[in-house]
Amino acid sequence: MITILFFAHLQEAIGKERIQLNCAPLAVKQLKNHLESEYNIDLQHVMVAVNEEYASESELIHPGDTVAFIPPVSGG
Amino acid sequence: MITILFFAHLQEAIGKERIQLNCAPLAVKQLKNHLESEYNIDLQHVMVAVNEEYASESELIHPGDTVAFIPPVSGG
Amino acid sequence: MNSQRFTITKEPISIEEVVKKVIRPEAGAVTTFIGTVREFTNGKRTLFLQYEAYVSMAEKKLAEIGEEIARKWPDAKVAITHRIGKLDISDIAVVIAVSTPHRKDAYEANQYAIERIKQIVPIWKKEHWENGEEWVGNQLETKAYPTGKPEEEDLQ
Amino acid sequence: MNSQRFTITKEPISIEEVVKKVIRPEAGAVTTFIGTVREFTNGKRTLFLQYEAYVSMAEKKLAEIGEEIARKWPDAKVAITHRIGKLDISDIAVVIAVSTPHRKDAYEANQYAIERIKQIVPIWKKEHWENGEEWVGNQLETKAYPTGKPEEEDLQ
């Protein structure tokens, strides 16, 4: 099982702060594609963090990982 | 009469914060020369303010003016 | 106030508290950057802002900025506090304090910190106007990161 | 604390008080420079410092720096407080706060202010070490001003 966190406009679009997903190890890119079609959202400019570190599209996600979708940040 | 103010090491060298001098109008340069010989001090790198504005060596000092000798500053 | 040097808080930020974390006998210069909520942006009047963060990761990323600065300016000491929640006009959103032995480094390292915050720290703000609200993206809006993360080189 | 934006004081300086003088709805960025007493200078250990000022003229010159900044950065608002008297290690000698709508100007104008203070404001410090004391001159020691005053161009 992986935990997926959403923030800012993504959280509002999906209506949830977090979801949990049972799946085999998969690449960040695959998870993005899955969520884009599942929730009808655009993740093109959204960064991904796996266990609180930014991850590339090809990085593998394993059971137990926490994946966060990070829209362009606007702190400061 | 003019009032003359001394600061920092000049104040210590002369032993006074201020002196008053009766004199005809004179240039900053002349006053510097007078004080250098009178008190045996070096005013070469010392700026002069007349009535709280920096003054050139040729500026005239008139009775009633306040003249301040300003060693290289070290605020901040 | 949290004694951590890199922290996210829901409370108003005390500038003095952040500065205290970096003052030390060997440093003669401290610079701070204080980001406040501006009333007008591109002619549009903001009523208030809502800041949200991925708190645990944001604190890690702030500390990472501290490490980047330690590599670039070995004598610098940095503390950063960012506030989240509802902020009114002129409220303080972020305080960055940098101490160094000499002042030029304190300005440069401080400016580096705010630029990096705007690139890599997972914090978002939602602007609330009289007639609407919107989550603010980065200023380029379309910035894509080929490696999936913003690099130090992305700093303009 | 004096409500004047350019002031010399014998009391400890509150950073928050100086910052408050420049915070305003149209400015989103405030930078501060905080000058503290450093323990070691050129390997020599300072015990404490004594600051002295030609107070009335110093406040005028601080205000003049504010006017120079207003000409160079028309959107900037500046406040400067300098302390005099006996200061211990890590005590705050000066606080410069600059607010601007955009942050780059706030850094530049702030740095300009501290450079100008070190050139034109009649304030002197005396260093006290374990084995002596000395009034500190400017860093060049031999700087001569042909016009009898330091010009804006003298800024490095």
Image (cartoon, coloured by chain):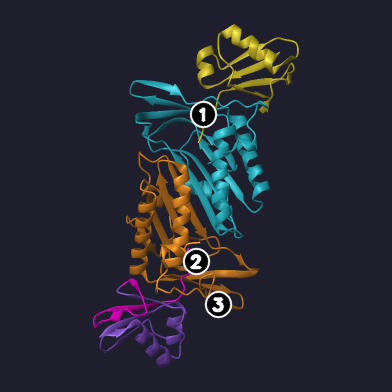
Chain colours: A purple, B yellow, C orange, D cyan
- Of badges 1 and 3, nearer the viewer stands 1
The 10 Å Cα crowd at callout 3, few under 14, some 14 to 19, many 20 or more, is some
Residue under the point 67% across and 21% down = B66
Q: Earlier in the sequence, mark 2 or mark 3?
A: 2
Q: Position of residue B2 (x, y in %)?
A: 69, 15
The lab-note entry on whether marks 1 and 2 share a chain reads: no
Q: State whether the magenta stretch is mostly helix, strand or loop.
A: loop
The answer to whether one can see residue D21 in this image is: no
Three-letter residue code for mark 1:
Leu
Read off the magenta span: A52-76
Q: Which quarter of the rendering shows the C terminus of chain D?
A: top right
Q: Quadrant of residue C121?
A: bottom left
Q: Position of residue C92 (x, y in %)?
A: 49, 59
Q: Quadrant of residue C47?
A: bottom right
Q: Position of residue D30 (x, y in %)?
A: 53, 53
The 10 Å Cα crowd at callout 1, few under 14, some 14 to 19, many 20 or more, is few
Q: CA distance from mark 1 to mark 3?
A: 56 Å
Dot 3: chain letter: C
- The numbered mark at residue C133 is 3
Q: Are marks 2 and 3 in contact (CB under 8 Å)?
A: no
Tag 3, which secondary structure? strand
Residue at mark 1:
D140
Residue at mark 2:
C87
Residue under the point 55% across and 77% down = C133
- Relative to D134, is D118 above or below? below
Three-letter residue code for mark 2:
Leu
- Relative to C73, is C148 above or below? below
B39 relative to C155 in the view: left or right: right
Tag 2, which secondary structure? strand
Three-letter residue code for mark 3:
Glu
